[in-house]
Amino acid sequence: MSRYTGSVCRLCRREGAKLFLKGDRCYSEKCAVERRNYPPGQHGQGRPRFSDFGVQLREKQKVKRMYGLQEKQFASTMQRASRMKGRAGENLLVLLERRLDNAVFRLGFATSRSEARQLVRHGHFLVNGRKATTPSLLVKPGNKVTLREKSREVTRIVGALEALEGKAVPQWLEIDKDSFEGTVKAMPTREDITLPVEEQLIVEHYSR
C-alpha cells in the first residue's frame, strides 16, 4: 500500500487548516499554518479560484488527510456510510471517529493519529483483553482499549499521557490513566468532530 512520506505540514497548508498531524507542534508557534498561512508552492500566495467540484474535492482531501486514510479506504468508508440509516455525511464522520487508531489518539495515548496508527500496528493495545493490530477496527460502546503492560514504559506513550493534562477527552470516551485503560461509553456524535468540516460537500463529491 502506498503512503505519503513527505512533510505533513505541507498538507495542513494545502488545506488551509490545522489538521493536527504533528502532535504538540500544531499547538505551538512553530505550526506551519501559523507561520505561512498560504498553500505551498511557487503559486501558493496567489488567489486560488475553485469551482464547485474544487471546493468539494478540497473538503474530501482535508478529512481524508485528517484521519490518515488512502483514497481507496476513504471511498469504501463513504460507500458504507451511504448504505447506513441517517445522513451519509454524519455516518461517514462517525465511522472515522470509531476507528481504533482514532480512539487511541482521542484517549491521549498518542499525540497524533499517525503515531496512534503505528502504535496499534505494533501491537501495543488490547481491545476487550485481546491484542488488536488493525487500525481500522471499529470500536463500539462497552469496548475497553487497554495499553499492554509491557508497553507502559514506552517514552512517547508516557509523554502523550502527561501532555493530556488540561486537554478534554471526548464525551463518548473515558480514560483511566492509572490503569492505562480507555472505555467507549457511547457512539460518537457529530458534535465530537472538533474541526470545521462540511461533510455534505463530501457526499456531493461522491454523488457526481
Image (spheres, helix red, strand yellow):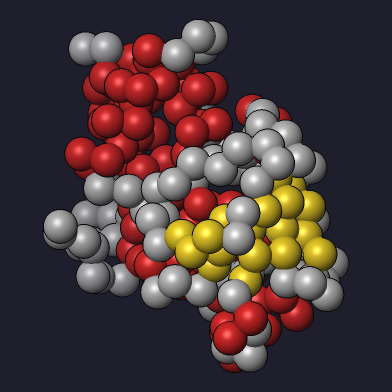
Q: Which of 64 and 29 is in front in this view?
A: 64
Q: Is 70 rendered above or below residue 203?
A: below
Q: Which residue in the rendered view is the most extreme toward the left?
A: 2
The answer to whether residue 88 shows anywhere in this view is: yes
Picture quarter containing residue 187?
top right
Q: Is residue 120 left or right of residue 60?
A: right
Quadrant occupied by the N terminus: bottom left
Picture quarter containing residue 151?
bottom right
Image coordinates of residue 166 in percent, x first then y, are 84, 67
Image coordinates of residue 99 in percent, x first then y, are 49, 46
Image coordinates of residue 121 in percent, x first then y, are 38, 67
The answer to whether residue 20 shows anywhere in this view is: no
| Residue located 45% across and 27% down the image | 92
| Residue located 62% across and 71% down the image | 147
Q: Is 155 rendered above or below residue 123?
A: below
Q: In this view, does 64 lie to the left or right of 198?
A: left
Q: Which residue in the rendered view is the most extreme toward the top?
A: 85
